[in-house]
Image (tube, helix red, strand yellow):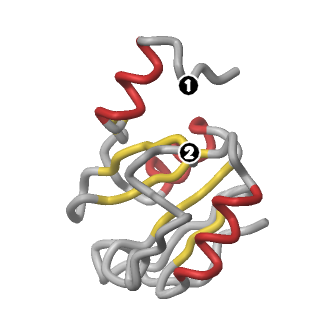
Amino acid sequence: MTARSAPHPSGNQPITPVPGVVRFSCDDLGFEDWMRANRSGYVLNFRDGRHGTLHHSNCRTFRVSSPRKGITLFRPKDCAESDSLLRRWATANGYESPVWCELCSAEESNGIASRP
């Protein structure tokens, strides 16, 4: 999959696509479908204009079983099969290096969500 055409999170610059990264903006159903199909994938969510947070696609932050309307409306979600692709996407688009979600980080240290 390739990145979908969408405004830059800052609202001003065009997105620089990175092969393997798909963006969901104003597309909750598409995001939910991707999450179901990519249980071992990763999600990059921007909490503000410059700082991104990395999540495992099975993170409790995103409960696909109880979808929230508008989850991709104000904060587009960038998704990929590896966190390195999302880090490359952030760098290519001029963002600071993303940090791990506290829930995902805690699960990693407890051996609950270990990934290759």
Placement of 44 over or under 3, stated as above or below: above
Instruction: Examine the rendering and report whether any part of residue 88 can be seen.
Output: no
Placement of 89 over or under 64, stated as above or below: above
Using the image, tell me which numbered label, if any, was put on residue 35.
Answer: none
Q: Is residue 63 left or right of residue 24?
A: left
The disc labelled 2 sits on which kind of residue? Answer: Asn
Residue extending farthest to the front is 66
Name the element at disc 2.
loop
Residue extending farthest to the top is 110
Seen from the viewer's position, the closer of residues 73 and 5 is 73
Q: How dense is the environment of label 1, judged by Cα within 10 Å: few (below 14), some, or many (20 and up)?
A: some
Seen from the viewer's position, the closer of residues 54 and 37 is 37
Location of mark 2 (residue)? 58
x, y percent for residue 58 = 56, 45
Name the element at disc 1.
loop
Quadrant position of residue 21: bottom right
| Residue visible at 79% across and 66% down in the picture | 1
Quadrant position of residue 37: bottom right
Label total for image: 2
| Residue visible at 24% across and 59% down in the picture | 47
x, y percent for residue 9 = 34, 72
x, y percent for residue 75 = 35, 72
Location of mark 1 (residue)? 113
| Residue visible at 60% across and 82% down in the picture | 29
